[in-house]
Structures are given as C-alpha cells and as structure tokens.
Image (spheres, rainbow, N blue to C red):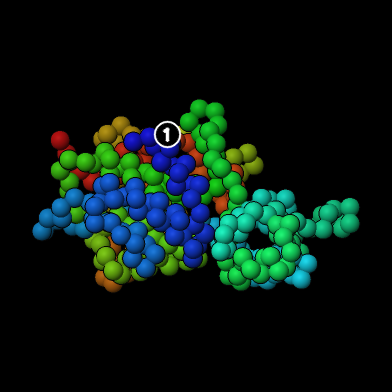
C-alpha cells in the first residue's frame, strides 16, 4: 500500500458533515479490499474484517469520515452566497479562502468581505459579514445551488520536507488511512479479537454517526482513531503531542485505563514510539459515544498529532500515521 497516496486520495474527497457521500464512497472502495462485505449504512461505512470466531470479543476500529466545512444559508439578489459553519472553524482564516459549493454541480468561489481600508480592519469577521463570490448572477446560482448545500475548502494536499504533509481534511482522513494500513498489516494474521471497522459520519457535529454505530455494533472494545493537537510555536508543550514522535494514547476518566495500559505495553514490547495524551474528562471524540452505548464498551483513543486543526493547511507526519497503524495491528494480532 502506498500510504501517502491513499491518504491524499481520501483527504481530497469532499465530505463536509452531513454530506459525506463522496468521501464515504472513496473509503468504501478502499475498505472493500479488506472487508468484502463493507457497505454504507445510514452514512457510516461499515465492514467486517476476516471471519469472526465464536467466543472472541468484538473490537471496533473507528475513524470519522466527515470534515469541517460550511452550509449555504442564503443567496443575495446580487449573486453572493451567505453561509455558516459546519463544525468549529476559526473565523480569522476566512477572508480570501478558495472554496467549492457542492450544489447540483460543483461551483468554485472565494470568501469575500469588506476590505480593511473601508473598515477598521481589526475585528474578527462574523459569518454575517462574509459572503462567497462565484462570479455568477442570482439566477445562475439559484438554478445550481440550494439552501443547505455544503461547502468545503478548495485545497489540494502537498508534501512538505521529510515525512510531513499538508492539506485539508487530514482530520480525520489520516485516521481512516491508518486503519486501512493496519488491516493491510493484519492480512493472514491470527487475531485476538473479532474486528469490525466503521468510518463514521458527523463527528464534527457531535459524534452522531458513532452514536448510531456504537448502538448497532455493540462492541466489547472500541478504539477511536482520530487526531489531536501537535505542538507549534506559542502553544503549551504540556498540552500537545509532537509531530513524528508516534501515536498519542489517551488516558482519561472517561476511557478504559485497562485498554490504555494494554496499548502502552504493546508499544513498549514492540519498540514503537508513542506519546501519552491525558484528558481530564470527555475526549470530544467518538470514544465518548462507545464508552456509554448500551452496556458500554472498553474504549480508548489513539490520536495522530496534527497542527493547524480545522484549517485548510493541517499538517501531519506520515511517520505518525504508519506508527499508529503498526500499534493497532500489534494490539490486535496474536503474539507470534
């Protein structure tokens, strides 16, 4: 598997929360290579890995397939598109961003605003102060765009120095890529668990897809593979992971300390680099849904360090994606 190629193909597929179909279809095609029964159920991509054996615990690998974006709220008489956010986005980055409106056809546009020399230039723009300019008239837009259509950043992925890459939707397509690579490593291996994979929807809107998936699948153990904050200048190093230093294993009162410790021991025993991520409550990931669904599942987070979260220029290190996959695979397979 060319892991970077897989990641780039996933990250460049459109999939704002609530309209994940293009990204889900891309992920489904990739997952079917390892889970032939994979299908899309209520938006979630779900597949069974290998032949499930009676008596083994069910372990679910989860990564969310949606990305932050925007939603069309209004079209002005002058032909500008008004919009609001889908997921948490820093409004400071909005002016001049290239975007794509996913209507009856994809339409490119740019976020525009009152220029600084016609305003005080010092305030963070509110959504009501911005609009998208496509160059089309109201009539042209009304024929192609509907209220409620999704909008995503118009960004391609790029390689940086070393193993680092940048793009939009690294959160959480890198988690999807890590799970796929883990399945590649687990082919023809004897497993300690029955494994089911889910690439879930609407995590950015409150882990809604995982809530459905957790209830439907009812796992014994769940690993939520997501991203977390990587250190950058000006940030608190104690609250961040570091790029290139390995997967971040979650420890929290809302997670299973048993699973956290088992993952740490797995990393130590296999010589894999890892980092500890301590959280003092909920994790704000899909793990929060699995741990309390039905009778509850033993749940832990495995996070990939990421800079510039929820922006068009998210940065990760491919070594961390590979490391995360190797940790997952080592945890699931029987000792040789």
Q: Is residue 277 above or below residue 39?
A: above
Q: Secondary structure at mark 1?
A: helix
Whether residue 292 is visible, yes or no, is no
Q: Position of residue 200 (x, y in %)?
A: 39, 60
In the image, what residue occupies the spot 64% across and 42% down? 234
Whether residue 75 is visible, yes or no, is yes
In the image, what residue occupies the spot 17% across and 46% down? 191
In this rendered view, identify the residue nearer to me: 121 or 4.
Answer: 4
Residue with the most extreme right position: 118
Q: Is residue 306 left or right of residue 298?
A: right
Q: Quadrant of residue 118?
A: bottom right
Q: Position of residue 88 (x, y in %)?
A: 58, 60
User: Which residue is identified by label 1?
Assistant: 319
Q: Is residue 88 above or below residue 227?
A: below
In this rendered view, identify the residue nearer to me: 231 or 219.
Answer: 219
Q: Is residue 45 left or right of residue 141?
A: left
Picture quarter with the N terminus: top left
In this rendered view, identify the residue nearer to me: 214 or 40.
Answer: 40
Q: Position of residue 70 (x, y in %)?
A: 60, 62
In the image, what residue occupies the spot 63% across and 68% down? 143
Q: Is residue 268 above or below residue 249?
A: above
In the image, what residue occupies the spot 43% across and 37% down? 5
């Amino acid at each position: 598997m060319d892991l970077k190629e897989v990641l780039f193909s996933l990250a460049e597929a459109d999939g704002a929360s609530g309209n994940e179909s293009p990204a889900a279809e891309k992920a489904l095609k990739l997952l079917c290579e390892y889970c032939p029964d994979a299908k899309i159920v209520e938006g979630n991509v779900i597949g069974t890995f290998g032949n499930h054996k009676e008596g083994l615990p069910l372990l679910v690998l989860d990564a969310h397939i949606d990305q932050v974006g925007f939603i069309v709220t209004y079209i002005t008489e002058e032909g500008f598109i008004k919009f609001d956010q889908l997921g948490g986005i820093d409004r400071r980055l909005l002016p001049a961003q290239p975007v794509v409106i996913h209507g009856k056809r994809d339409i490119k546009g740019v976020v525009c605003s009152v220029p600084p020399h016609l305003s005080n230039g010092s305030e963070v723009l509110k959504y009501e102060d911005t609009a998208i300019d496509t160059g089309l008239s109201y009539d042209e837009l009304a024929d192609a765009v509907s209220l409620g259509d999704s909008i995503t950043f118009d960004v391609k992925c790029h390689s940086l120095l070393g193993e680092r890459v940048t793009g939009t939707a690294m959160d959480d397509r890198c988690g999807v890529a890590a799970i796929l690579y883990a399945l590649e490593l687990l082919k023809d291996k004897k497993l300690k668990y029955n494994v089911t994979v889910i690439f879930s929807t609407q995590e950015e809107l409150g882990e809604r897809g995982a809530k459905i998936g957790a209830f439907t699948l009812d796992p014994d153990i769940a690993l939520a593979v997501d991203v977390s904050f990587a250190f950058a200048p000006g940030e608190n190093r104690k609250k961040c992971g570091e790029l290139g230093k390995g997967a971040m294993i979650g420890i929290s009162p809302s997670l299973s300390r048993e699973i956290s410790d088992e993952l740490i021991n797995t990393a130590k025993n296999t010589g894999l680099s890892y980092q500890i991520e301590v959280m003092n409550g909920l994790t704000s990931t899909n793990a929060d849904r699995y741990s309390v669904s039905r009778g509850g599942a033993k749940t832990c987070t495995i996070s990939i360090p990421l800079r510039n979260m929820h922006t068009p220029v998210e940065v990760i290190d491919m070594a961390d994606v590979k490391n995360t996959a190797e940790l997952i695979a080592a945890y699931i397979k029987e000792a040789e």
